[in-house]
Image (cartoon, rainbow, N blue to C red):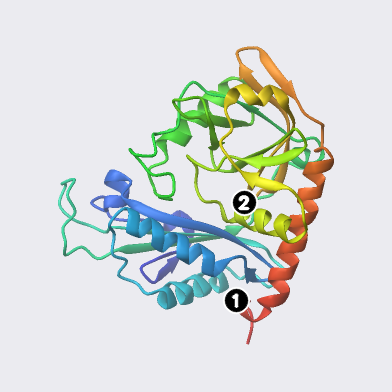
Amino acid sequence: MTNIDGNIVPTDQAAVPVLDRGFLYGDSIYEVFRTYRGIPLFMEEHFERLENSAKLVQMKISQSREELTQEIKRTVLATGATAADNVYVRYQITRGEGPIDLHPDKREKTRYVIIVTPLRAWNPKHYSVGMSMAIPSVRRNPVNALDPNIKGGNYLNNVIAVMQARKKGADESLILNAEGYVTEASNSNVWFVINDEVVTPGTGNLRGLTKAAILSGCAERGINASERQIHCEELASATECFVTSATREVMPVYCLEVLEGEFLDFPRGGGDRTREIQAVYREVVEEYLDAHSSDSFFAN
């Protein structure tokens, strides 16, 4: 089901006006989360990141956090889902309708679009074996051109990257910046084990909430995991690789094409450190769910 400004309809019947700036210019911001047992994971953190995206694009959100929360709940319930059904929720804020002009009209009211679907079931082999990645020729937009912490509707950089990776026969892309530093995958944060240290790029990528939860969980458990710059030349020393996101959780990578026909191989199904991080994340999620049971969309 999809909710557009309070009107909930089947997703295949949902539509926005052609003069909506989100459609015309990608002038929108969004967040995605999933539920466990009817509980939205990291709901407050997602709203904080949405509001930070709005600040970075100079957008004043017309709807309050409370209104959006209620509309998200209405949309989830309208699907007929129960607490036993894990769902995917995407809520997008566009700058609204206005003249065909790059400069926004100050009188515009933001539009919200809430999409709720069953949680995507990833290919089981992506966990039992892992997925493959390739470095595309396209490079990440410079940070001073388009801040990656704007989780916005303009995703062409990522779309082109994953298309190029798929043409190489890979499942996912690993995007470098112009200087050759690793940034992220097309829609996930990426991690490596280098010299037995678990590392993830600290700049040039979206501030991932799953990544933040893992770093915090590792710190609490005395596990060495950190953010830092990772140059592509270091990847030859990597012994494990995995990606993280709200819907993928912790997914191992079994091979990476770094140059045309040149591959790095990693343990199938994830090595010891990857499995350790998977266990940490499961514990972090369970702790969160125990502490936020009252947040369930199905709570009385």
Q: Residue furthest bottom?
A: 300
Splitting the image into 4 quarters, where does residue 185 fall? top right
The mark found on residue 156 in the picture is: none
Residue located beneath label 1 in the image: 297
Kind of residue indicated by mark 1: Phe
Pick the front one: 215 or 58: 215
Residue located beneath label 2 in the image: 211
Kind of residue indicated by mark 2: Lys
Q: Earlier in the sequence, mark 1 or mark 2?
A: 2
Q: Is residue 212 above or below residue 140?
A: below
Dots 1 and 2: beta carbons under 8 Å?
Answer: no
Q: Is residue 136 above or below residue 142?
A: above
Distance between mark 1 and mark 2 Cα atoms: 25 Å
Q: Residue at x 76, y 51 (%)?
A: 223
Mark 1, other Cα within 10 Å: few <14 / some 14–19 / many ≥20: many
Percent coordinates x, y for residue 219 in the rendering: 71, 57
Pick the front one: 255 or 169: 255
Q: Residue at x 43, y 44 (%)?
A: 148
Mark 2, other Cα within 10 Å: few <14 / some 14–19 / many ≥20: many
Percent coordinates x, y for residue 39 in the rendering: 64, 71
